[in-house]
Amino acid sequence: MEKKLITIVHHNLSYKSGEGKVVFTAIDVIKDHKIDFTIATFSKPENEYGLPIKYFLPFHFSKFDRYQRIFVYFVASKIYSRIYLNLAGSPIPLSKKGIHIIYTGSSPFSVTKYSRSLFWKVYRMPYKLFLGLMKDEYKRAKIIANSYYSAKVLADQYGIQPKVIYPPVEYEKFNKAFHENNDGYILTIARIERGKFLERVIEVSSKTKLPAVIVGYLNDKKYLIELEKIAKQKNAKILILTNKTEDELIEIMSKACCYFHPTEGEHFGIPVVEAMSAGLVPIVPRESGASELVPEFSYTTIDEASQKILEIKNIPLSKRKELSEKSKFFSTERFKRELWEYISNFLN
């Protein structure tokens, strides 16, 4: 096949999230098919991984994640490409320069987590204005949604019909944590940052009287200190573990009783599938993409979530094995195959 140039657009090149796994798996897809490519990102990555990268800031910067998804345009727009594979998810105006494929979750400010506090209302205002100005870009670009939840939100807001491709999950790694005993602590996996609403984990732990462990990369040390203070005030048994290796995470999962996902409005949630692979029953917000995976374990209120967690002991081992088997659908190979089938339509 003749080599044709693709620019992969992402604002923060890092493995430290489920989104990062999507990016690096997409890079593997392009490399597997020997396509010339470059990567446009906002700031210099902590590790360049030997990849062809162009960036805007000559130093690493991790704050204001949502707005980096806009500013990466100033790098991507200077690169001539046949295809722009935008994994940052924002509708930056690239479709006039080439074929613009956006892999995205639901519109980031359509969900309730951004409307409950003054902080989020102020934070979202400029970006919400940007989305309003970029409505036509959603219609010009080729849109891939990462869940049917996301696809529905995008369809309702912009009158488009996205293709749905679920993210990749390395389920086979987390299956090592499968255990028959469903005693232990509540587990949550998420970056330590305000948008994940980890104070909900503390509320659930306090209501159920069960210990909880939060595992994630530390993005906001001030928030971590606040969480520890809240846990102490509520007399909740909370352990927050930061920057753990994958092997350490698997060991932690092997001693948990269930998985609690606190982030309402999140478009998918890769840790939910990882937990399923480990045989952990995931308790997830009804208003999220994860609820389409396990609707029977979804919740609306913290009280409802707490009650479902207390009922975990009554769930048979066969159901947990069923959840683990279900996680296999979300394999990396399935994602790579579906993404390449879609991209290759625009290379011919």
Image (cartoon, helix red, strand yellow):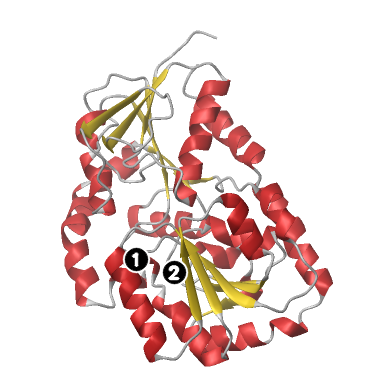
Q: Name the spot of residue 309 as percent of width and height, x first.
A: 62, 83
Residue at which label 1 appears? 195
Residue at the top extreme?
Answer: 2
Numbered tag placed on residue 115 in the rendering: none
Identity of the residue drawn at 67% across and 77% down: 184
Q: Distance between the residues labelled 1 and 2?
A: 8 Å
Q: Where is residue 297 in the image (x, y as percent from the top left)?
A: 63, 75
Q: Residue at (56%, 86%) from the top-left corner?
A: 306
In this view of the protein, which residue sits in the foreground, 287 or 217?
217
Crowding near pointer 1: few (<14 within 10 Å), some, many (20+)?
some
203 is higher (above) or lower (below) than 317: below
* Residue 263 placement: quadrant: bottom left
Any mark on residue 263, and which?
A: 2
Please say if the residues under marks 1 and 2 sit with CB atoms less than 8 Å apart: yes
From this viewpoint, which residue is outermost toward the right? 318
Q: Dot 1: what SS?
A: helix
Which one is nearer the viewer's eye here, 305 or 250?
250
On the question of residue 285 being in view, the answer is: no
The three-letter code of the residue at mark 2 reads: Thr
Q: At x 49% / y 36%, what residue is drawn?
A: 24
Where is 10 relative to 291, above or below?
A: above
**Label 2 environment density (alpha carbons within 10 Å; few <14, some 14–19, many ≥20):** many
Q: Please say whether residue 6 is visible from this viewpoint.
A: yes
Q: Where is residue 339 in the image (x, y as percent from the top left)?
A: 55, 35
* Amino acid on which disc 1 is placed: Gly
